[in-house]
Image (cartoon, helix red, strand yellow):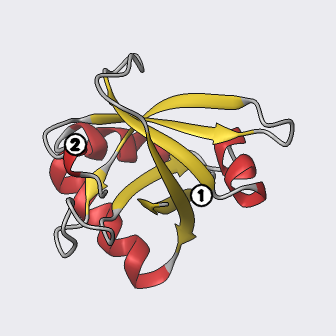
Amino acid sequence: MGFAAFRDHKYISLETFKKSGEGVKTPIWFAADPASDLAGDHAQLYVYTIGNTGKVKRIRNNPRVKIAPCTIKGVPLGEWADASVEIVTGDESARAMGLLNKKYFPWKQILGFFALFSRRERIVMAIRPA
């Protein structure tokens, strides 16, 4: 199982689910946890979003998601994988943001600068194989 198929990609399509069961797909940046084996059952990817977005509301209601490698526009480039997602805080959140900063340098830093002018919080999530 695991997430080995995501190793060389820049974006994943994150499909979250409404209460009706309808899926909503969003292309999003991600970073792999280097302490986890992407090919194993304990693989872990980190993503973040700004504020109380629809995907955060859907995840709080249902942590079951699907992910697939994709283009910046969300066009899938591989198979979908079942996963679960959890909002993380504290040290794990800070570590995840560091991984994302490193992978997406300098673009994430530029976006982060503009986010300073917004009061919306950043939500960090860990995605694990289902």
**Residue 119: x %, y % from top left:** 63, 53
**Residue 19: x %, y % from top left:** 85, 43
Along the line of sight, which residue is nearer the eye, 13 or 122?
13
What label sits on residue 66 in the rendered view?
none
Separation of disc 2 and disc 1 at Cα? 30 Å
How crowded pointer 2 is (Cα within 10 Å; few <14, some 14-19, many 20+) is rated as some
Q: In which quarter of the image is the N terminus?
A: bottom left
Q: Which residue lies furthest to the right in this view?
A: 20
* Residue 13 in the image: above or below residue 1: above
* Residue 125 in the image: above or below residue 42: above
Is 113 situated left or right of 35 in this image?
Answer: right
| Residue 123 appears in view | no
Along the line of sight, which residue is nearer the eye, 63 or 40?
40
| Residue 53 appears in view | yes
**Comes first in the chain, label 2 or label 1:** 2
Amino acid carrying mark 2 in the image: Ala
**Residue 81: x %, y % from top left:** 42, 43
Where does label 1 land, which residue?
Answer: 121
Is 27 situated left or right of 17 in this image?
Answer: left
* Residue 80 in the image: above or below residue 46: above
Where does label 2 land, which residue?
Answer: 5
Q: Residue at x 29, y 43 (%)?
A: 108
* Disc 2 versus disc 1: nearer the observer: 2
